[in-house]
Image (cartoon, helix red, strand yellow):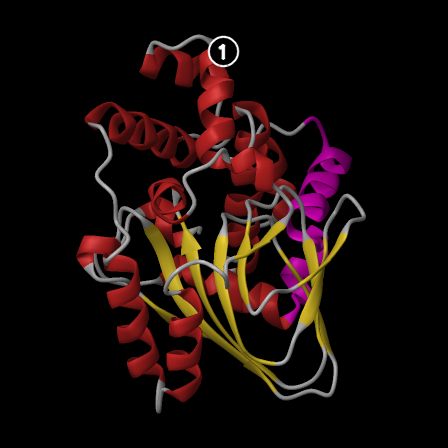
Amino acid sequence: MRYFALPEQLNAYFGSLYIFTETADHYSDVTRADVPQLRFMLENSGDYHFHDGKIAPTPEVCLLGPTLGATRFELNGPGRVVGISLLPAGWIALHGGDASVLTDRVKDMGHLPGYRDLLEKLRAAVDAEAMAALCWSFLAERLVALPESTWRLLEAVDGWLMGEGSPRIETLADITGLSPRQLARLTNKYYGCPPKLLARKYRALRCSARIALDHESWQALCDDGRFYDQSHFIREIKHFIGLTPHQLQTEPSAVAQLTLLRRSLGGDVAVINRFS
């Protein structure tokens, strides 16, 4: 897995670009709960196994909606994938609909103008830098201007998610001046779920990074993250990450390790991007 920090003009819309390569006859691993992903399957195909039991084949040009639990994926042989993680503004630019409709689901984007052309160009590209340049151009053409009120809301929600160990809905309501009902409608639309579930998801993402990358004691994080007890902490990490805290600390899977490395992206990358 190789990551690329995006050009400055794309930073508010997308989290990162990555190229994933594997050479096994059959490959399977688990990815954490995540933001939406646009993925181009350069070689081979596979399936997503969502936490609710649904299984979906992967289109060649795949828009994976926000995931609210660990997702297992399988590749049927050696594969190459180019992926881009979408922040809410990027979701608006590439899809525009209610994100909660595609939560834990996939959409085939291959029939939309430009997407299959990019797939074929990526397949013919000679190196990773050329692939990244093709994607920068493609994404830049699709940026849309958002109202200032939407930017302010997204900045408020992002700051809320990253600013507290266990984000409280009351805090977000105070920051935005919006009612719980209004917040639920807007976070469903832009993030794929209501504030309470969104807070749980990002609490787990932050804790998992502190365990696996910062080597903090997961037992100590139970109190820091306002979990009820150790059993609650273990269940939350297992649900959103796909591994127990002990596994994260001692034997994280290859994809879990590589995904967590997004946090270390350099350059002018917002904190929320590092977790997306």
Residue for badge 1: 180
Q: Quadrant of residue 146?
A: top left
Q: Can you see residue 224?
A: no
Residue 211's x, y, as percent? 56, 53
Horizontally, is 51 left or right of 266 in the view? Answer: right
Q: Is residue 69 magenta?
A: no
Mark 1 lies on a secondary structure that is: helix
| Quarter occupied by residue 31 | bottom right
Up the image or down, 266 lies above or below 150; here it is below
Give, as a three-letter code, the residue at label 1. Pro
Q: Which residue is located at x 47 percent, y 30 percent? A: 189
Q: Is residue 130 left or right of residue 227?
A: left
Q: Which residue sits furthest right?
A: 53
What is the chief secondary structure element of the magenta stretch? Answer: helix
Picture residue at 59% right of the left edge, 36% below the top: 101
* Vertical arrangement, residue 19 with respect to residue 104, above or below: below
Left or right of 86 on screen, residue 237: right
Q: Position of residue 241 (x, y in %)?
A: 64, 51
Identify the residue at horizontal 81%, vertical 48% (top origin). Answer: 53
Range shown magenta? 228-253
Pick the front one: 144 or 10:
144
